[in-house]
Image: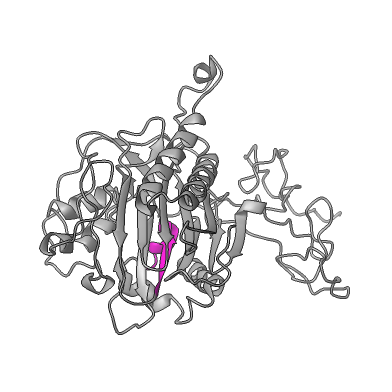
Amino acid sequence: MMSQMPEPPPPTALSRCPSCEEPIESGDRFCGACGYDLSAVPPRPGDFPTLTLSGALASAPHPPPEAASVDWPHAPETNSSGTPAPVHLATDLRGTDSGETPLPPVAPATGVRFDRAAGGEPDEYPLQAPAPRAAETATPPAGTKVCVACRAGRVDNDGYCENCGHAQPRERDHMEDEVGPLAAVTDRGLRHHRNEDAYAISHTTLPNRTPALVAIVCDGVSSATRPDEASLAASRAAGDSLMAALPQGTHPQQAMHDAILAASNAVNALADEPAGAREHAPHQNSPACTLVGCVVTPSLLVVGWVGDSRAYWVPLDRSTAPARLTEDDSWAAQMVAAGLMNEAEAYADERAHAITGWLGADAYELEPHTASFKPDRPGVVVVCTDGLWNYAESADELAEVLPPDAASRPLHAAQVLLGHALDGGGHDNVTVAVVPFPAPSQGAGSA
């Protein structure tokens, strides 16, 4: 009697690869484009993507709790609301962790806009790469593109490793840049199928021949249409605006305010669609993103933001306190500001990352926030998306991870912070820029 052949595995029910979104045939076990294992699609992870929030809660952010008790000196420039922005020493600031007693939870807030129906296609997929085998050939010559998996095989013209067959990541999946004395990295993370973050870093010279460092970080709103395009357009527009304004003598705080408006206009332009486009895709909304940025000179530190991406100050002398320089436009921040929850409780809530401010044509209200600081000692500014600060939320936690030589090795410091987020789970895209203060004079010419 003939022996029976083993039963073949059940064919996949997917029409597109969860990793690269290429079409697949019924019965395929692996994606022919990227090698993704189609036999099992894991459940949606328990993290929450950035969402937008509109309605009664969407108002201008409250200042940090410690700001109310400080007699802030008058700033030469104001934000768009006409209120002087605070100017103070870095040593005046404390970390933003709340030590208050937890308060009773509040009733669920209304007005949260969920752009995907419950039970729909998940936003993130844990991706699995083919197991690389040992290199069978000699290390490729210098200048050859080397595989990110086995670190030995040459990458062919189709984007695959000739040694282990691993499909190489898209360009925006992981990017690193070091421009003069500052650096930035961005990474897709371990759960998202693409990178929706973007950054722009540069340096220039002011009219008085002193240097100025510029860093912009943007996080695409996951529930919006084309968030990756929104973050890229916003970061480029804001960076270009600052690089045009600062050499002409525009005050850095005013230049930051104008840069946020330029970024907003760039994102709004993405919403322009041919007539009838919404008729075929009525569920889609306008592209949107958050933004945070800084300008550093030899004596001044200016930050600007819309949304929940953050800027932190970490002094080189770790015996003095680090500080968070921005206040989130988010549900959690408003709950803390209203005294309804302490910070730990608010950010543990599933609604924490619903944002009340963003860049996009359907934004509830655009309110660029700017603030200027005059630190009295050297340090570094860390500008990042929530993909990092989810794993180092307080200023003290972030300072513990940041290497002591961050000011002199900014790219290494940014890589360490990225590694911390990936080691913590990498549930979101991660982008971080590291900027030294004061801006060093050497190598700070026009970018």
**Colour pattern of the rendering:** one colour
Tell which of 373 and 421 is nearer to you: 373
Q: Quadrant of residue 53?
A: top left
Question: Horizontal placement of 318 versus 162: left or right?
Answer: left
Tell which of 343 and 246 is nearer to you: 246
Question: Horizontal placement of 317 versus 36: left or right?
Answer: left
> Does residue 333 appear in the picture of this structure?
yes
Q: Quadrant of the N terminus?
A: bottom right
Q: Is residue 175 above or below residue 26?
A: below
Tell which of 237 and 338 is nearer to you: 237
> Does residue 190 appear in the picture of this structure?
no
Q: Position of residue 172 (x, y in %)?
A: 62, 52
Magenta span: 379-392
Say whether residue 382 is magenta. Answer: yes
Tell which of 373 and 162 is nearer to you: 373
In this view, the residue farthest toward the front is 208
Q: Is residue 445 above or below residue 247?
A: below
Say whether residue 187 is magenta. Answer: no
Question: Horizontal placement of 59 versus 377: left or right?
Answer: left
Query: In percent of the image, x 55 and y 74: which residue is there?
Result: 412
Q: How many marks?
A: 0
Q: Position of residue 221 (x, y in %)?
A: 44, 43
Q: Quadrant of the C terminus?
A: bottom right
Q: Is residue 204 above or below residue 23?
A: below
In this view, the residue farthest toward the right is 137
Q: Is residue 38 above or below residue 360?
A: below
Query: In percent of the image, x 33 and y 50: which residue is there?
Result: 353
Q: Position of residue 61 (x, y in %)?
A: 23, 48
